[in-house]
Amino acid sequence: MVEPLNTSREAVGWVLGVYTISTALFMVLLGVVTDRIGRKKVLIPCLLINGVAGLAGYFAPNLPILLVFRFIQGIGIAGMVPVVMTMIGELYDGLERVHAMGIMSMTTAVGSVSAPFIGGTLAVFGWNYSFLFYGLTIPLAFIAMLVLPETMNMKANPEQRTGFKKMFMSLKDIRVAYTVFLSFAVFFLLYTIVIYVPFILKDNFGFTSQGAGLALGVEGASVVIFASQAKRLASKYPKYTILGIGFTLLGIAVVGMSGVNSIPLVFMLLLVFGVGFGMVQPLLNALITQVAPDDEMGSVVSLFNTMKYVGQTAAPAVLGVILLNSNLAVVFITSSLLGFCVAISTFIMRHKIYTTDT
C-alpha cells in the first residue's frame, strides 16, 4: 500500500489500528442495542455494513478515505461475533452449547490461518484486491435474514431491558466478572505470542516476516484440532479443570519461548500454545452465555468480547515497556506468570463458580 497510496509504513499500520479501535468502541454499545431490539435486527445490518464498507476499500483513492471505510467496517464487526455468541447461547444448552462454541472457535482459527494467505494472494493483482473478499458478507446477510431465527425473548418488557448501568452492575456477579477477566487474560497471552515470537524467528533463525507469519499458522492449526474436541472434554472433566490445564499449557508455551534454541522447539511450543488456547476459548465462550443474566446476555457477551481487544492492546503496551528495559526472555517470563496465576485461580475459585454444566 505504501507506494500506491503515497504514504509510509507507519501510516499503513492504521489500516488495522483504526479498524480494531472502531470495533472496540462500538461493541458494548451494540451489545446494549441488541438486548433492546433483537439479535437479527443488529446482526443483519452489521453484516451489510461490514460487506459494503469492506468492499468500498477497493475503490479508496487514498489512505484517509480508506481509513474512513475501515472505521465504518469496524462498526459492522462489533455487532457480528457478540451477537452470534449470544444466539448460540440462547439456542443451545449444556454440552451442545460447548460444542457449538467449539465449532465457532474452529472457524475463527481457520480464518486467522487462511486470511493472510487469501489476502496475500489477492494482493498479487493489486494492493486493493484483498478488499474484494469482504463482499462475500453481503449475500451472507441475506442468507442470515432467511435462515436464522430471532432468539431473544420478545416477551420481556422493553423498559426493563438492559442499559449500560445494568450491564456494568452485572459485574457484581463474581462469575461474570471472572469470565470477563479470563477473556482479557487469554488474549493478552495470545498477543504475546503473535507479536514477539516473530522477533525470535527473524533475529535468531533468519526467518522473513512472511515466513514468521506462516509459522504462527502452526498455532492456529492446533487450535482447530483441539477446539473440535471441546464437547468431549467438557463431558469428561469439570470446567475449572479444563481451564486450569489450558492456562497452564499457555503459560508453559510462553515461558518456553524465553529460552528456545532450535526451530523444532519453537514449533513444538506453538503447538502446545494452540492446544491450550483450543481448550480454553470455546469453554469461555460457552461460560459467558451461561453466567450472563438472560435479559442482559447480548450486552454482557459484548463486554466479554471487548476485553479481547483490551488484552490485545495491553500486551504490546505493557510488554513493550518491559522490553525497553530488559530483553525478550524477560518479556516471555513476565507474560507467562499471568497464565500460571490464572491457572491457579481457576482451582482456588472452583467452589464459587462453574459448578454446574447447565
Image (spheres, helix red, strand yellow):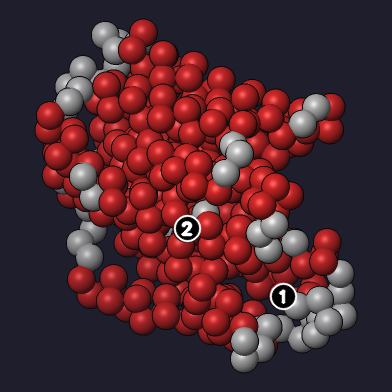
- Quadrant, the N terminus: bottom right
Q: Quadrant of residue 334?
A: top right
Name the residue type under label 1: Leu
Q: What percent of the width, then of the height, locates residue 251?
A: 49, 27
Residue ID for mark 1: 66
Residue 202 sits above or below residue 208 on the image: above
Crowd tier of the residue under label 2, counting other residues whose Cα lies within 10 Å: few below 14, some 14–19, many 20 or above: many
Residue ID for mark 2: 217
Instruction: For marks 2 and 1, give the CA distance.
Output: 28 Å
Q: What percent of the width, then of the height, locates residue 280?
A: 35, 35
Crowd tier of the residue under label 1, counting other residues whose Cα lies within 10 Å: few below 14, some 14–19, many 20 or above: many
On the question of residue 42 being in view, the answer is no
Looking at the image, residue 161 sits to the left or right of residue 132; the answer is left
On the question of residue 13 being in view, the answer is yes
What residue is rendered at 44% in x and 50% in y?
219
**Residue 75, disc:** none
Q: Secondary structure at mark 1?
A: helix
Q: Quadrant of residue 137?
A: bottom left
